[in-house]
Image (cartoon, coloured by chain):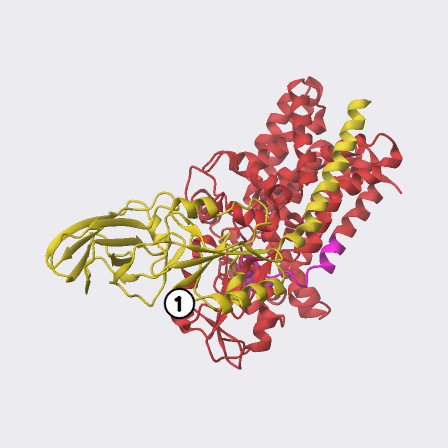
Chain colours: A red, B yellow
Amino acid sequence: MTDKALARALGFLTAAALAVTQAPVGFVRDEGYYFAAAQRYEAWLRLLLHAPLQAVAETEQYWAYNFEHPGLTKLLFAVSHLIFTTWLRVLPDALAWRLPAFAFAGLLSYWLCLLGLSRSRAAGVLAPLLFWCAERTFFHGHLACFDVPICAMWTGVGLAWLRGTGPRLATTYGLALAVKHNAWFLPPVLLVHALLLPRDQRTAGLRKLPWLLLSPAVLFVFWPLLWHDPLRHLRDWIAFHTHHVHYAWWYFGQVLRAPPFPVEYPLVLDAMVLPLPTVALLAAAGISLLAGFARRRLESQRLLELGLAGAALLPFLLRTTPIFGGIKHWLAFVALLTPEAASLLARVAPQPRLLVPAAVATLAAGAWQIAHVHPYGTSAYGELSGGIPGAATLGMQRQYWSNNVTGVLPWLNANCPPGARVYFHEVNVESYRTYVLVGMLRGDIRYAPDPEQADYVALQWHREFRDREPETWNAFGTRRPATGLYLDEVPQVVVYARPGLPGGP
Amino acid sequence: MVLHRAAFVALIALGAGSLLFDLTMGFRLPSDADWAEAAGSLRSRARPGDAVQIWPVWAERVRLFVDAAPVLAEEDLEHADYLEVRRLWVLSLPRTPFFRTPDPALRARGATAAGEVQRFGALALQAWDLHAAALAADLTRSSEEHEVDYVARRCLRVPPGGRFAARGTAGTALHLRAGIIGERAYDADRPPIAVQVFADGAPLGILEVARTVRDGTGWRRLDVAIPSGAAEREFLFAVSSSDRARQLCLQAWTTR
């Protein structure tokens, strides 16, 4: 098998593994919005096919929703749904929307494998495995969101910079821009990388860099919102992210609400949520790259990996960037360290036949984490934090994004009387509608705005929303839950029923 | 070569240790049968005036099982008021990671163990006598609970500008607790809320509830001696602030 064939095989395997395991993954809050956006964009696509001029004239009407993120991924969600669900009727809605995300995940594996292969064949195989063999990363791979796609494009831009032509670099970076605003940080990384290279490579790099000036054209093409009044929409996009709200986040017993945040926060969180052997290897990889940099012994690729990993993390070391969302906003930091980590892992085995035990020892804890915690990825914690119970004792964010509600939907379906009103707490109405659409929730179960107006309550345990539980006790006159989702005893979703109703006290 | 071999051995040990930790987690956690046994024991031994304190406080699955006494999830065992609780059953999960025994905090408040620790699988149950001062009057008598500083408190919601009056046995000391409900306690640039206390018209003290800056400090306390006088008095709590958007919750009682 050639190197490229191996990388392609790993890419397809990644996408297939995610597709096979996606069904139980709940719809995170943001997915609810992106599904709603994809539905609007699909309507626009159909209009485009039937009345192109009208579609072009009415882009604002369809694309203004979720203006804060560029169009590419949501457009792909829409195209996938249009083809596989609306036209061919071969895929259920959620799987069709999520399919492009799996493709991005596959691309990430493909590119990580290529980076690893430049060191050794073993490193090529182990790099994507190291990235995916943890519940947090595995979970994010399933979502019709932007975190894994931008992580993939971050890596892809790196490879295009190292090995591609100018046009390829311009296209790849344009696609990254069209995925998520993280891409704004890439040109400075490439510039610094070029400046640090030996003279001949530096010249070639600096000659390639201007191709990036063409990349905004790709953003423009894949984001029809920009087709009218582009400056206003670009301004709104940038303003949204430069003035982003800070959501409360529980960290070592204190709720972080506003800057300044702890400088070590992203590194500590990585160490707390990822499996310990992976943490150790990634730390070794980081040290190895930094030591190589200090000794001026890094060749172009390793220097770029260090730069891309550092750039993915840097905004979150500034103490002012919003820190919510677990590790999802700096997944590229983890990803770009995996080729070096994989290489170290491959080299640590004294003999080739001992590579498999070394790899198994490294990956087994992550595999167990996935088997044990999936699909509740936002709740996963590694051994350093004492698993989920240890993290709860330490006062770490229990979960986020509301997808864990899937753990109690079967109970609600089985117990709620017809037309029952359920307060779903953090589950937004868009995700609620998707649960109904895909059949995970009975269609007659209604969405209640607060516990007072509900027959049942499904509370997601968040430190900052603790007031909701006593509110429910007051409204229902009972403190006894009907059921709940508890991971290793730790409450995630607690369900209350009004006394006298099915399942209630 | 030695370094190489050591790194290999260390990696294998780290991987095996991590996996061992993961695979044995289940043995450190209670089963449904453990919970049911503990609940059964409490059912047969709990008396009026008892309460169950869970430890660590996240172990709230207990609420599915224990029905013999109120379940409390106080976070600061040394300073929690445990109003009307004479005996506290501490139900804990001592095998969980980073577990810290609650005993020193309970001893620091003057509580004494009222029996041996009973084990139900991964659960431990022990009764503690709190030796609390005898209650003279529960002035607020709230049946509602509200979250202040991340703990459910049996307190009365009084908006700024509002008053609350109650008649009760004076005793020797008045205890007032107050805090802002929910996350609004952390709102920046908000003025403090003041609670003025009067007994039969005479001022007893003022409790100022400022914006909470650090978790664990939002439930403010005022303990004052009651001057001699009538055995029963009219207590008045006047809540004032230039910002009326936040909800204050207060709890007051007297002790003999």
Q: Is residue A213 left or right of residue B175?
A: right
What residue is shown at x 33% (from left), y 54% (from top)? B132
Determine the main secondary structure of the stretch shown in magenta. helix
Residue A431 percent location from the top left of the image: 55, 64
Residue closer to the observer: B245 or B119: B119
A29 within the magenta span: yes
Chain of the residue that carries numbered disc 1 in the rendered image: B
Q: Which residue is mark 1?
A: B48
Give the residues drawn in magenta, as a range. Answer: A15-44
Q: Based on the displayed image, in which of its 4 quarters is residue A382 positioned?
A: top right
- Vertical placement of residue A344 versus A22, above or below: above
Residue closer to the observer: A78 or B206: B206
B89 within the magenta span: no
Give the position of the N terminus of chain A as an image quadrant: top right
What residue is shown at x 66% (from left), y 65% (from top)? A82
Q: State the residue lying farthest toward the front.
A: B115
What residue is shown at x 51% (from left), y 54% (from top)? B58
- Vertical placement of residue A454 versus B191, above or below: below
Element under disc 1: loop
- Vertical placement of residue A190 versus A406, above or below: above
Q: Is residue A148 left or right of residue B12?
A: left
Amino acid under disc 1: Pro
Residue A275 percent location from the top left of the image: 67, 43
What residue is shown at x 58% (from left), y 60% (from top)? A486
